[in-house]
Amino acid sequence: MAAAPKTDFPLVSVIIPCYNHGRYLQEAVQSVWSQNYPATEVLVVDDGSTDDTREAAAACAGVRYIYQANQGLSAARNTGIRHSQGEFLVFLDADDWLLPDAIRTNVRWLQQDKRLAFVSGGHDKVFVEEGITKADLTEVKDNHYQHLLQGNYIGMHATVMYRRQIFDEVLYDTTLKRCEDYDLYLRIARKHPVLHHCQRIAAYRLHTTNMSANIPAMLGTVLEVLARQQSQLQTAAEQSAYRRGQRVWKNYYCQELYRKALAKKVPVTKEVIFTLLKHQPSLIPRYMLTPYASAIKSRIRKNAPAFGLRWLHRMGLHKEYVPAVGKADLGDFDSTRPFSKNFGYDRGGPVDRYYIENFLQQEAGSIYGRVLEIGDNEYTLRFGGNQVAQSDILHVDASNPKATFVGDISDAPHLPDNTFDCLVLTQTLHLIYDFKGALRTCHRVLKPGGVLLLTVPGITPIDHGEWKETWYWSFTDKAMRRLMEETFAGGHADVNCFGNVFAATAFLYGMGLPEVPRARLDFNDPHYQVVVTVKAVKAPTA
């Protein structure tokens, strides 16, 4: 090997590994020759390219071309180190380029402090598809190893200039197919002083052929590289930085993967789903999970049944999940006090209203003609609308000025017989001690063929306020069927119940309706009846 030319400036070796990026090579080399620094050599290490890399290198004046069978980026850089002669070394990928004054700037820093193993700077990110460039400048003044544990603040390898002697101690790890630069930074900064500045040194071209475009592989490797440092940690601050680094990398790559999947820039493959599932499952929309539900369940049962199956259950993809004895996660329900003592009115409205109002919406066609509603006429007007010819209100006392009748429906001889086309009686029967008397009144005042729309509570809290002293009953669908047989003999009654264990629990705790997913409310389990609804039709002839 010929001796390097003697100058008053330390020789800088710029090593350009190239694998099938021949079309970019001339621009990278020209960015080196355009530097205002007089002592440089350029080595192109062709890592077994099958394109025109050899010809492209031959067309670049002053370049030393070295060919090797394909071994990967780490091996190519190590080859460049062995063949280089410079006191300082820079590694420039073939599809990137150096910015003006890059070499002189970093040489100056290394000459000012002989202890530094390397110096790094800022860079430009060039987004090829979008046609935009953004400066990436991160200020790090001290604790460089600790900062590197929290993330790769350097971000681009060509901004780094190494002192040659450091490679007597470390080389690139050829077992790593990616993140080999981050691994090297950590190993060096663990033992040696390094420096970082915010002057822009190089341009990083981001396009679909970058190795960093394979997000699941990048995340897996960067976490592996970081994990190698765990045994080297010496202080509580380093331990904390290490844990934060794990979170930072998972969040960064998972957010990027999620964004690209939504934008359809990457296909939603099993690898994508399992990467998100392992590191940030909360990001995954249900529609992405459904095609892989069986495979996901199998993996979760094997690796993380306690957390994973519970999570799938919450996503609606594993309905039979039951926690092991003693492993139930009580979460916010781990309290003897409800969230609301007002049925959830202070949290957006009661859960039971969902079932009551769905029932009335479904039966809106029956709310017509002359309608009597108990308490007020809100539901009559909302669901009956223009079908209602006359709206009457029965109130137990005169406190409602809109009431057309005042009295107790269980004993109301003043209500006229065979008068109303529809009677709306929601969530009131449980407050009437003589509820059978109330039902007889309902039957009496309806016209032949008239309809009673009735709802009653099943599983329910008891009012803390106005109604607590007169809260007598709860009902089941079976009880209501028996009562309808007794009071609407000869007519017809359609009795249904709504609820499930989750809906009942949410209602008991006072969760507001907006807080509860509709899919959870729509699932019906008759063993946990929150609301019972009745549509009873009076026989056509009294």
Image: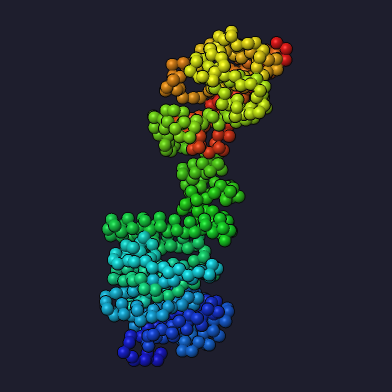
- Looking at the image, is 155 positioned above or below residue 303? below
8 and 223: which is toward the camera: 8
Q: Residue furthest front?
A: 401
**147 relative to 470 in the view: left or right:** left
- Looking at the image, is 409 positioned above or below residue 157? above
Residue 214 rendering spot, x and y as whole percentages: 52, 64
Q: Residue at x 33, y 74 (%)?
A: 118
Q: Is residue 393 visible?
A: yes
46 and 356: which is toward the camera: 356
Q: Quadrant for the C terminus, please.
A: top right
Residue 39 rendering spot, x and y as whole percentages: 37, 87
Q: Quadrant of residue 22?
A: bottom right
Display colour scheme: rainbow
Residue 50 rendering spot, x and y as whole percentages: 57, 78
Q: Quadrant for the N terminus, please.
A: bottom left
Q: How many marks?
A: 0
370 and 514: which is toward the camera: 370
Q: Residue furthest right?
A: 541
Q: Residue at x 46, y 43 (%)?
A: 306
- Looking at the image, is 487 positioned above or below residue 291? above
Q: Is residue 17 visible?
A: no
**161 relative to 448 in the view: left or right:** left
**535 relative to 128 in the view: left or right:** right
Q: Quadrant of residue 403?
A: top right
- Looking at the image, is 248 positioned above or below residue 62? above
Q: Residue furthest top?
A: 413
Q: Residue at x 60, y 25 (%)?
A: 380
Residue 98 rendering spot, x and y as whole percentages: 43, 78
Q: Residue at x 42, y 38 (%)?
A: 331
Q: Quadrant of residue 451?
A: top right
